[in-house]
Amino acid sequence: MIKARRGPRGASVNESSGQPGNSGGPGAAGDRKERPRGPGGGLLMGRPFGVPVYVAPSWFLVAILITWIFGGQLERVLPDLGAVRYLVSLFFAIAFYASVLVHELAHTVAALRFKLPVRRIQLQFFGGVSEIEKESETPGREFVLAFVGPLLSMALAGVFWLAMRGVRPGTVPGVLLAGLMVSNLIVAVFNLLPGLPLDGGRMLRAVVWKISGKPMTGTVAAAWTGRVLAIVVLVALPLLSYSDDMRTDSTGSITDALLGAVLAAIIWTGAGNALRMARLRERLPDLRARSLTRRAVPVSSDTPLSEALRRANEAGARALVVVDGNGDPMALVREAAIVDVPEHRRPWVSVGGLSQDLQPGMRVSAELAGEELLDTLRATPATEYLVVEPTGEVYGVLSTSDVERAFVAAMARPSS
């Protein structure tokens, strides 16, 4: 499945400093220095196409579960295997998740072809997610991006079916190939169900987007369809299993009911997250550097804080920029540092000791807005930024606290 990050890239301006905080079944369940274990990602297994692939710790639980369940089935089909059946089952679990990885790589390759950055692929409890950083620009691309995953899963099912023709049924290769064929077919069909966060939900979103001309309308339709789908899964899966079995032993029915509940929860949560993400992206353009920037006054580094604040008050400014002898900006006086200086000490404290030197990433354009603005701030974490005009003239100072307040206010507005 395709999954956006936990908020648009800009939804987290400065993760390390506490500033504005910078999806369902198999194949879709949903620091600058790379380490074997990423932040919440799991174990780094490789970088196909330059995209890191992580295996979450929860995958090992699923691998054990699949090994145990498939091993029990092999005992009935191939009783002569003995304990070796669990090694065969483990191989099946690994091969199945390799198929899930191919499903996710299909999304990744399509995204990269459309110039959409992919943060990572993660294999986890109920399959995998391809974390694509940005939304598709057109409904056609959205549809293709979603459809390629199930398409590859169907193609894999066909390959395994053809391979079955070349082996004898009732043998280890025959059973493995049959299992992989069926499992990939299930992955494809499940992901084609028309509700977010599944690939079919993204396809439905693309269709509604194309008809209505509004991506948000498509998201709302696909998200609510996903919630209806979650309820159907919650109710239908246990009922179908019970009507199939009519067992006197209720263990299987309880297991199916739990599975249905987990799948329904994943789909319901994913649909809700997709809806919140869409609303967030819809409101991000309201965040504009120009409208959020504070007016600033230039001061030399040896200026007493009390004098600097007097000048700022007279000019109606709320920020201080430290300049050199030529009037060129060198540093920004930190608001938090000003607050920490008692009023009686301010005549004796120079602004130079309360400032942060300007780094290249701390100069931002007044024209930035939305995700582009937040991406820029996130690239160089700081509490204040110097805002400049396209011509290079100083426009003012942008505080991340102001960005945070504007972000929260935008999200609090009722939907139109």
Image (cartoon, rainbow, N blue to C red):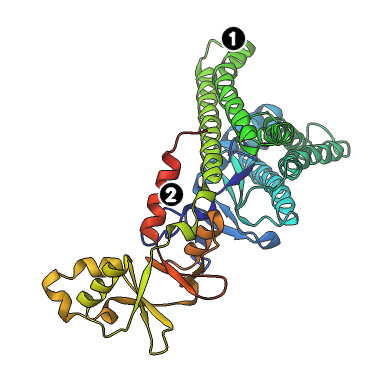
Residue shown at the point (41%, 84%) measured from the top left = 327
Say whether residue 213 is left or right of residue 156: left
Viewer-proximal residue among 345 and 125: 345
Q: Amino acid at mark 2?
A: Phe
Residue 357 position (above or below residue 376): below
Local crowd at mark 1 within 10 Å, few (<14), some, or many (≥20)? few
Sequence order check: which comes first, mark 1 or mark 2?
A: 1
Q: Secondary structure at mark 1?
A: loop
Residue 68 percent coordinates (x, y) = 57, 35
Residue 371 percent coordinates (x, y) = 55, 55
Q: Amino acid at mark 1?
A: Met
Residue 109 percent coordinates (x, y) = 73, 53
Q: Is residue 70 visible?
A: no
Say whether residue 238 is left or right of residue 1: left
Residue 3 position (above or below residue 379): above
Q: Secondary structure at mark 2?
A: helix
Viewer-proximal residue among 353 and 17: 353
Q: Which residue is mark 2?
A: 407
Q: Nearer the viewer, mark 1 or mark 2?
A: 2
Residue 375 position (above or below residue 231): below
Residue 328 percent coordinates (x, y) = 43, 83
